[in-house]
Image (cartoon, coloured by chain):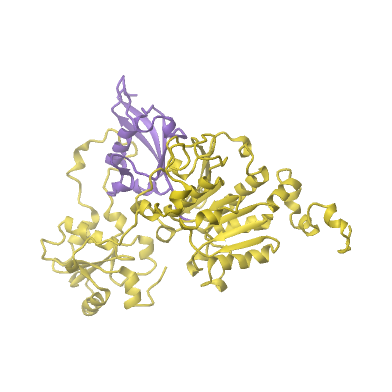
Chain colours: A purple, B yellow
Amino acid sequence: MASDTISITVEFTGGLELLFGNKKKHTVSLPGASKTKNPDITFLVNHLCENLMQDSRRELFVLDGGVRPGILVLINDADWELEGEEKYELQSGDHVLFVSTLHGG
Amino acid sequence: MAEDPTNIDTEQKWPLDPEEYKRYGRQLIMPEIGLQGQLNLKSSSVLIVGVGGLGCPAAAYLAGAGVGKIGLVDGDTVEKSNLHRQILHSTATVGMSKVESAIKYLTSLNPTVKYVPHIAHVSTETTLDLFTPYDLVLDCTDTPASRYLISDTCVLLGKPLISASALRIDGQLMILNYPPLPPGNSKGGPCYRCFFPKPPSPESVTSCGEGGILGPVVGVMGVLQALEAIKLICAGINSEEPVESRDRPILHIFSGRPGATSPFQFRAIPFRGRKSNCAVCSSFATITKESLTSGSLDYQKFCGILNPVTALRAEERVSVEDFAESISKPMTEVRSAKRTDSRKYTVVDVREKVQFELGNLPGSINIPYSELCHVTRSDNVSMSAQKESSKDGQPTPAWVTTLSKTSPDASIYVICRLGNDSQLAVQKMKEYGLGKGSERFIADIKGGFSSWREMVDPTFPDY
């Protein structure tokens, strides 16, 4: 594997998949890894907007550069707040799940 | 054994009524319930807020299980479009209040339960008094504003909350504020605000009316709420030990999964405890009983109100009546000429394909709004090394090409379900130069098919 990219799994649920070609699970190779620092969640979110998102309505995914309110981010099935939120540095093989909260009843 | 109803000893001899042993027999013999569990159920009271797709199955199972008192809150009346999922209501109760309709059904299911009707929506003025007499609350509502209000009230009153939601084929469930310890006690369970400190923008909130909902999916979630409620009640709601001694709160996610034989999926995601700076359940809480009742909190405003789109100028919009008139003549010409490109207008229907197929105007073209918003990407799964080169020189979307082929002097009328997306679609078409300066008339049809049905064609399918 090239030293400057890492491969992770990204998953969308709760309707977010509709913004990403109606596909829930994606394998994503992220550039920008260096010896001292790996890409963080902020980088990933921006990367997803630029490369994977198939809908022009970015506001349904991001707000002010971060994930919009109402979306939970889980890193390897754990709450991202336990992992340092957007500063978390991704590791090869990580699983990042974006859950849009539902309101219907 | 003692059949004689005058025998006073019978009542004292057995903790449950003879009829209760029969009625609850199948659950009584389970070690998870047993006599103590049944007595807990009998002495418990549950408030169900929202008697829709979640509240109906939840109420049915809780009534069936023998919960002593069930309060039902809803200000809506039964509509025909509710019946595919809201199983307590029936064709005969369309138009009746949901609460009355539900109690009618529940009484026939189990007349020994006490049902308390609250025919109103929850509001800041009423929730504290309304929730106080109950041990446990089920959030079966469908808006962010009510979800925040219900959660805040439960925290302030120390009541556990079982919250569920559903849309399309997905569902979510959380047990909140459990154990229900006072604000500031970090051992208490997290509340809705701990998960979602900021509300989602109203644009990102999809209702069942817009996005759709499958009956069994929301039904599963409501049934699970009833299950969690029964577990909590049997374990003792105020017991210090959380159910199953779990040390972390859990977000349950259900996916019905598309595809005829795709397995459905349940996931349990462990979450953190209370947020240290939560606005209601932390020691830095700013939301109190006083602030709730004083009216200083406006939940609707907090969550934002979605106003109808007003993206276009008046001259870029036509009424359904004017549209009907302007299409009546050319349409016949088109038909006789049997040449679609000779028409003097083009009607673009921007509803999603599945809605278009439910009913449409003859000769109209379907370009779904999602297609107008689609960004063309090379459909490479791992797109890491994709060059950015195609970024600006993006290919022209297929829909632009399609519309470019129509006669340049033919007007374009854009229609949708309610008249919001159609305006945004007109803007997009103009951005792509389809207006040819202002040579070509492009307009949206005000009020969409909703107005069309009301003013022009009452037979147009109403879904």
**Occupied quadrant, residue B408:** bottom left
From where the camera sits, is residue B148 visible? no
* Rendered view: B232 above or below B421: above
Write the residue at 52% across / 72% down.
B94
Q: x, y (%) of residue A54?
A: 30, 47
Vertical comparison of A91 with B115: above or below? above
Quadrant containing the N terminus of chain A in the rendered view: top left
Q: Residue furthest top?
A: A35
Residue at figure coordinates x 57%, y 69% from the top left: B90
Report x, y in % for residue B344: 18, 72
> B453 and B359: which one is in front?
B453
Q: Give the residue drawn at x 38%, y 27%.
A: A92
| Image location (x, y in percent) of residue B312 | 21, 63
Is B70 in front, or is B327?
A: B70
Residue B25 drawn above or below residue B360: above
> Quick check: B101 left or right of A8?
right
